[in-house]
Amino acid sequence: MFMEIAIGAIGIGIVIMIGYIVIAQVRSALPTSANANVTNGITSTENTVFAGFGLIAVGIIVLAAFGLINIFK
């Protein structure tokens, strides 16, 4: 069961990382005089991606803790 959860967490992490790369490339491709609404939207999307990174990190830590508990049980 833990292996499936770990594989799922890794898959979600890969999707979020690809999303971050796409957003970073869009931000760098925009001209410096880009519309403020677009810039605010990209900033908001980056914050959501950073929150996703945090959730994945917490999930992996909890998964590792449960794995260690079951190993030493």
Image (cartoon, rainbow, N blue to C red):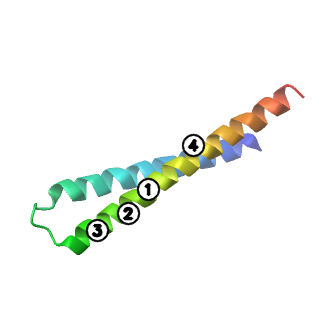
Query: Is 2 or 69 nearer to us in this picture?
Result: 69
Q: Amino acid at mark 4?
A: Ala
Q: Residue at x 16, y 57 (%)?
A: 29
- Residue bearing mark 1: 49
Q: Are marks 4 and 2 in contact (CB under 8 Å)?
A: no
Numbered disc 3: secondary structure:
helix
Which is more N-terminal, label 2 or label 3? 3
N-terminal label among 3 and 4: 3
Camera-nearest residue between 6 and 42? 42
Give the mark, 3 or 1, whose residue is nearer the N terminus: 3
User: Label 4: which residue?
Assistant: 57
The alpha-carbon separation of the residues under discs 4 and 2 comes to 19 Å
Disc number at residue 45? 2
Q: Earlier in the sequence, mark 4 or mark 1?
A: 1
Tell me the CA gap for discs 4 and 1: 12 Å
Instruction: Look at the numbered discs 3 and 1 and tell me whether their residues touch, using CB distance below 8 Å.
Output: no
Hey, what amino acid is under mark 1?
A: Val
Pointers 3 and 4 in contact (C-beta within 8 Å): no
Q: Is residue 11 visible?
A: no
Mark 4, other Cα within 10 Å: few <14 / some 14–19 / many ≥20: some
Residue drawn at 63 percent across, 41 percent down: 60
Q: Quadrant of the N terminus?
A: top right
Q: Amino acid at mark 3?
A: Asn
Q: Position of residue 16 (x, y in %)?
A: 45, 53
Instruction: Find the distance from the CA under tag 3 to the CA under tag 2.
Output: 9 Å
